[in-house]
Amino acid sequence: MEKMFCLGLLLGAMGGALVVANSYKARSLVKKSQAELMEKVDEMMDERLRQMESTQEKTDKKSR
């Protein structure tokens, strides 16, 4: 059962890669999705850094 699942997963991944490699529309969709994902990750990281900086400033003020 596990071997069949792994085989199906592998064949599906290979089939998807072939479709994307041979289809301009699919390839552009993947690139667009990757760009959107990277933009969201950048925004999340910026927000996290701002939160860390504000927390550090608060602790610095308390220690003085």
Image (tube, rainbow, N blue to C red):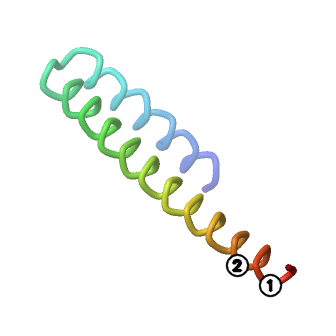
Relative to 50, residue 10 above or below:
above
**Quadrant of the drawing holding the C terminus:** bottom right
* Left or right placement of residue 11 versus residue 62 in this view: left
* Left or right placement of residue 20 versus residue 57 in this view: left
* Left or right placement of residue 28 versus residue 51 in this view: left
Q: Looking at the image, which residue is at 63% across and 46% down?
A: 3
Dot 2: within a 10 Å radius of its alpha carbon, few (fewer than 14), some, or many (20 or more) residues? few
Relative to 10, residue 40 above or below:
below
Q: Looking at the image, which residue is at 50% across and 54% down?
A: 46
Q: What amino acid does circle 1 point to?
A: Lys
Residue under circle 2? 58
Dot 1: within a 10 Å radius of its alpha carbon, few (fewer than 14), some, or many (20 or more) residues? few
Task: Confirm or deny contact between disc 1 and disc 2 (CB under 8 A).
Answer: yes
Residue 28: x and y, percent? 19, 26
Helix, strand or loop at label 1? It is helix
Q: Looking at the image, which residue is at 45% across and 47% down?
A: 42
Between 46 and 64, the one lying in front of the other is 64
Q: Give the number of the disc on residue 9.
A: none
Q: Looking at the image, which residue is at 45% across and 50% down?
A: 41
Residue 24: image quadrant is top left
Q: What amino acid does circle 2 point to?
A: Lys
Residue 48: x and y, percent? 56, 63
Between 35 and 27, the one lying in front of the other is 35
